[in-house]
Amino acid sequence: MVRDPSRAGADVRNRGIGRGRMFMGGLLLFAAVIAWGTALMMSPHGQATAQGTEHVRTTVVVFMRNSAIGALLLAAVAGWLLFPARRPKKPGRDWIVAGILAVLVVSSLYQLIWLKTALN
């Protein structure tokens, strides 16, 4: 038995790279959302400090600062992986990912600025 020769068409030998980028980008974006959400849940916005717990303040601030910076770094790498030079023809997915990245970046930057003013 002899197989028919394949038809001439687009070169699809390197499709795994695009799929790998999308997978790793999605995974890193998910990790960024988890880091962002954890810091958001730990945030003491609007809560008064109970007497006798002031010594914990610097630990919470350091944790929140590191979480915000980590979320920014993960979002940057995820954005780089999810938006290659050649784009697939799915603009809806692109707008959703760009929106998620924008929310992560803006809220993490706000968190960093708020922490800077909270310590003063």
Image (cartoon, rainbow, N blue to C red):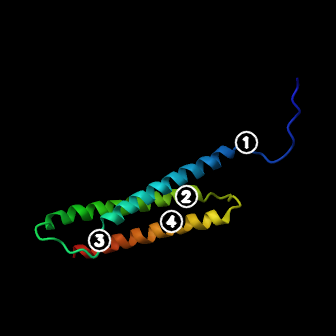
Label 1 sits on residue: 13
Earlier-in-chain disc, 1 versus 3: 1
Q: What amino acid is at disc 2?
A: Trp
Q: Position of residue 98 (x, y in %)?
A: 56, 67
Separation of disc 1 and disc 4 at Cα? 31 Å
- Which quarter of the figure has residue 104? bottom left
Q: Residue sitting at 29 percent across and 71 percent down? A: 115
Q: Element at badge 3?
A: helix
Separation of disc 4 and disc 3 at Cα? 21 Å
Q: Residue sitting at 48 percent across and 55 percent down? A: 30
Q: What amino acid is at disc 3?
A: Leu
Q: What amino acid is at disc 4?
A: Leu
Earlier-in-chain disc, 2 versus 3: 2
Label 2 sits on residue: 80
Q: Residue sitting at 44 percent across and 60 percent down? A: 33
* Between marks 2 and 3 in the image, the one whose residue lies nearer the viewer: 3
Q: Which mark is residue 101?
A: 4
* Between marks 4 and 2 in the image, the one whose residue lies nearer the viewer: 4
Label 3 sits on residue: 115
Separation of disc 2 and disc 3 at Cα? 27 Å
- Which quarter of the figure has residue 108? bottom left
Q: Quadrant of the N terminus?
A: top right
Earlier-in-chain disc, 4 versus 2: 2
Q: Position of residue 41 (x, y in %)?
A: 34, 64
